[in-house]
Image (cartoon, rainbow, N blue to C red):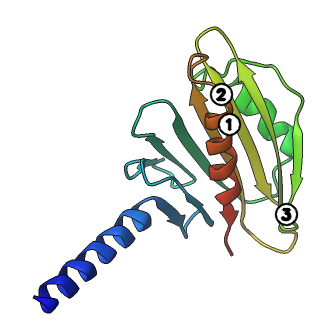
Amino acid sequence: MKIKIVILLIFFCSSSLLIAQNNEIIDNNYKFKITLPSNYPKAKSEETDKQDAISYSSKSGDGKLSVMILAFKLTTIKNLADLIYTIEKDLTLNLPKRTSDYTDYDFGTYDGRSAVYKNNDFVETVYFFRTKYNDSPANYAYVLRFITTPAFSNITIDTEIKNIAASFKVIE
C-alpha cells in the first residue's frame, strides 16, 4: 500500500512539473524565456523561412486573455522608437490606438517600453524590448502582446499581464 502511495505521489509531482515546464517558453535561438500561467496550453510557434523571426501564441484556459510573442534576430542594435513605430503601423497586426503614455524599462543588456492600446473591441498591453549588445554580431527585438476585450479588462487581467511580462528575460 505504501509503495502505491509513493508511486502515485511521484506521478503527481512529475505531472505537475511537466505542466509547469510546458508553460515556460525557452528559446535559445532567439535568446529569451517567458513563463505562462498553468491554465495556458503550450504555445504554438511559427518561424519565418529566413529564420530571422518567430512568433508564439497562446490563450488562457478561460479564453479571456491571448498572448503573442514576436522575436526578431538582428545584425545591429534596433532603435527602440523605430521598432515601436514599425509595429504600431503594421497593418497585419492591426493594433488599436495607443491610449496610454509609454512606460520605460532598462535591464542593462536590454531595455524596452510598454503601452496600452484600446478600441471598442480590444484592450491590448504591448511590451517592446530590444537588446543592446555593442560588441556582438547578433541583437534581438521582442514584442509581447497581451490581448483581451473591454468586457474582460480588469485588475485581475492587468495583474496577470504584469506577472507574465515580468517573467520575460533575455538569455545569453
Structural crowding at the residue carrying mark 3, measured as other residues with C-alpha within 10 Å and reported as few (<14), some (14–19) or many (≥20): few
Indicate which disc residue 158 carries.
1
For badge 3, the amino acid type reads Phe
Mark 2 or mark 3, which has the lower sequence index? 3
Instruction: Kindly identify which residue carries mark 3.
Output: 107
Crowd around label 1: few <14 · some 14–19 · many ≥20 (10 Å) = few
Left or right: residue 122 versus residue 86 is left
Q: In this view, does 113 lie above or below 123?
A: below
x, y (%) of residue 132? Answer: 84, 62
Residue projecting furthest to the front: 1
Spot occupied by residue 44 in the image (x, y as percentages of width and height)? 40, 47
**Residue furthest to the bottom:** 3
On screen, residue 29 above or below 57:
below
Please state the horizontal and vertical placement of residue 146, each as a whole percent of the image.
Answer: 61, 36
Task: State the mark number for residue 139.
Answer: none
Q: Which residue bears the numbered disc 2?
A: 154
Question: Disc 2 on helix, strand or loop?
Answer: loop
Kind of residue at badge 1: Asp
Q: In this view, does 84 lie to the left or right of 59?
A: right
